[in-house]
Image (spheres, grey):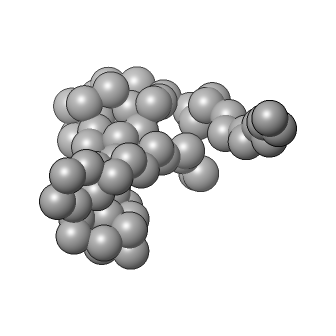
Amino acid sequence: MRYAIVIEKAANNYAAYVPDLPGCAATGATVEETEAQMREAIEFQLEGLRQDGLHVPDPSSRVEYLEITG
């Protein structure tokens, strides 16, 4: 599965979340660390959903960039 993540710069670190997995978030000192923490958070959340017999949401979010001139 391939989930979209959003990484945002905070005052002293980076924070990330997964639009398709409410409550799944992570932080890190660098983008790379945040991505690694996010990977672990996603795996942990999916494992918990499966263990609890709950539905694992399919990835459905889409990420696009818009170029704005002016």
Which quadrant would residue 61 be assigned to in this image?
A: top right
Residue 12 is left or right of residue 4, and the answer is left
Which residue of the protein is positioned furthest toward the front in this rendering?
Answer: 70
Q: Is residue 40 visible?
A: no
Q: Compared with residue 45, is residue 13 higher up or lower down, i.e. above or below?
A: below
Which quadrant would residue 50 be assigned to in this image?
A: top left
Question: Across the whole image, how many numbered discs are drawn on residues?
Answer: 0
Q: Compared with residue 40, is residue 48 higher up or lower down, i.e. above or below?
A: above
Q: Residue at the spot x=38%, y=68% of the render? A: 31
Please name whichever residue, 27 or 24, is drawn nearer the observer in this view of the structure. Answer: 27
Residue 35: give x, y in percent of width and height.
38, 65
Instruction: Quadrant for the C terminus, please.
Output: top right
Residue 52: give x, y in percent of width and height.
21, 31
Residue 39: give x, y in percent of width and height.
37, 61
Q: Is residue 18 visible?
A: yes
Please name whichever residue, 66 or 2, is drawn nearer the observer in this view of the structure. Answer: 66
Residue 64: give x, y in percent of width and height.
73, 39
Residue 47 is left or right of residue 35, and the answer is left
Q: Residue at the spot x=17%, y=59% of the render? A: 12
Q: Compared with residue 54, is residue 67 higher up or lower down, i.e. above or below?
A: below
Residue 16 is left or right of residue 19, and the answer is left
Q: Residue at the spot x=67%, y=39% of the render? A: 63
Q: Residue at the spot x=31%, y=64% of the render? A: 34
